[in-house]
Image (cartoon, rainbow, N blue to C red):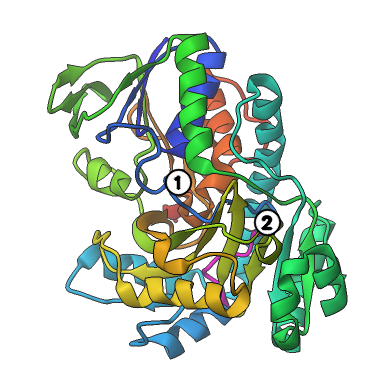
Amino acid sequence: MKVVVLGAGIVGVTTAYFLGKDGHDVTVIDREPQSARECSYANGGQLSYSHAEPWSNPAMLKKAITWLGKDDAPLLFRFRADYQMWKWALKYVFNSTAAKAQKHLEIILALDLYSRQMMHQIVADTKIEFDYIQQGIIHTFRNPKNLDAEIEIAKIQADLGAPYEKWTVEECVAREPALAHMAKEMCGGAFFPFDESGDVCAFAQNLIAYCQENYGTKILYETIIENMIVNKGSISSIRTNKGEITADAYVVSIGSYSSLLLRKVGIDVPIYPLKGYSISVPVEDEGKTPRLSITNQCERLVYSRLGNVLRVAGTAEMAGYDDSVNAVRVNMLKKAVNDHFPGCGDVEKATEWACLRPSTPDGPPIIGKTKYDNLYLNTGQGSLGWTQCAGSGRIAADIIEGREPEMDISGLIIDRYRC
């Protein structure tokens, strides 16, 4: 079967990989000159399989209200006259109950753990390089109440298959000596041994090259998707700036722009961008730079070692489709590096990045069929695109192939919003 995948980000590329592995004739379309040049380019690097708590939960909603108007808040809403933004925000509030948060945590964790399994399969089969570290992730805390709250969530996740360890400050520093400078302000930490880290951009670009070489996958870069042409309940072609492209099946994996394209053919998906930021600091002192990936839960920042670079990422900003870099928020990241890992590298030499994370109001992505018999979705992974890409890609390929996915996908399909 001939399949066109719209989008060469990490989710589109892993979808193309599994489709190619299944023997399909795959073409990938992307407006950029390379794969993984937008949201997948410079994320936090974490494969955080144990990070399943959705942003839509009562505690985060309460904090988000107190953060309104604060330019340096971890979660910032810049409300404007945008109907889609307000509709998404109302759905976010609706989903921020304890019961719904618990349900969505279970769905997200199931996908995360399945993705871990599929990622290990991809790495074993392809042997591609991407600064892969399989040594867990440490979550650090200043406030004992916040640490206790994290442990309560970790206990729930442990019952569902994601182990954890509660560590003292001394145990955190013993495992990651670069935390010594932070020790005086820490109260302890939580360690998640299943978690990993790696360079998402290197992975995506090396994987698509593997697909081209081994499966004959075709890539159409610098090709702008303008519309999908509908004919008798199916998509007959994709209209681009370089002409029309036809296939037997089509998969939409263009991140935050998925909702804009899909609305043109009468499909309303509640995906809206939440802008995230990162900096990549060249490492100058190995001894002062963390080797393990770290999540600072107080500031909601993540640190990952990617070769000779320390990647620092975090914050979420609802600002429409504006992907410009906000100096205030980037300076937050630079200050955090200087405060917590002084001397590891010169933050003024860091490259700066902002991206639009395709976020759903409840947390889980949207994967599966649509009202058109040959149009499929694999989008809305939000800040967990890197974490969930392998599982999401396998599920999408299974659905297109007509196989029953290995995990329950009822919490991932678009029909969950039709109630």
Q: Which of 175 and 145 is in front in this view?
A: 175
For label 1, the crowd category at 10 Å Cα-Cα, with few meaning under 14, some 14 to 19 and many 20 or more, is: some
Amino acid carrying label 1: it is Asp
The quarter of the picture where residue 1 lies is top left
Q: Where is residue 296 in the image (x, y as percent from the top left)?
A: 63, 72
Query: Is 343 drawn above or below residue 11 in the view shown?
Result: below
At a point 67% along the width and 58% down the height, the residue shown is: 286
Query: Is 274 drawn above or below residue 168 in the view shown?
Result: above
Residue 15 visible, this angle: no
The residue where tag 2 is placed is 106
Amino acid carrying label 2: it is Glu
At a point 67% along the width and 28% down the height, the residue shown is: 123
The residue where tag 1 is placed is 415
In terms of secondary structure, what is the magenta stretch mainly? loop
**Disc 1, SS:** helix
| Quadrant assignment for the C terminus | bottom left
**Disc 2, SS:** helix
Query: Is 15 drawn above or below residue 54 in the view shown?
Result: above
For label 2, the crowd category at 10 Å Cα-Cα, with few meaning under 14, some 14 to 19 and many 20 or more, is: many
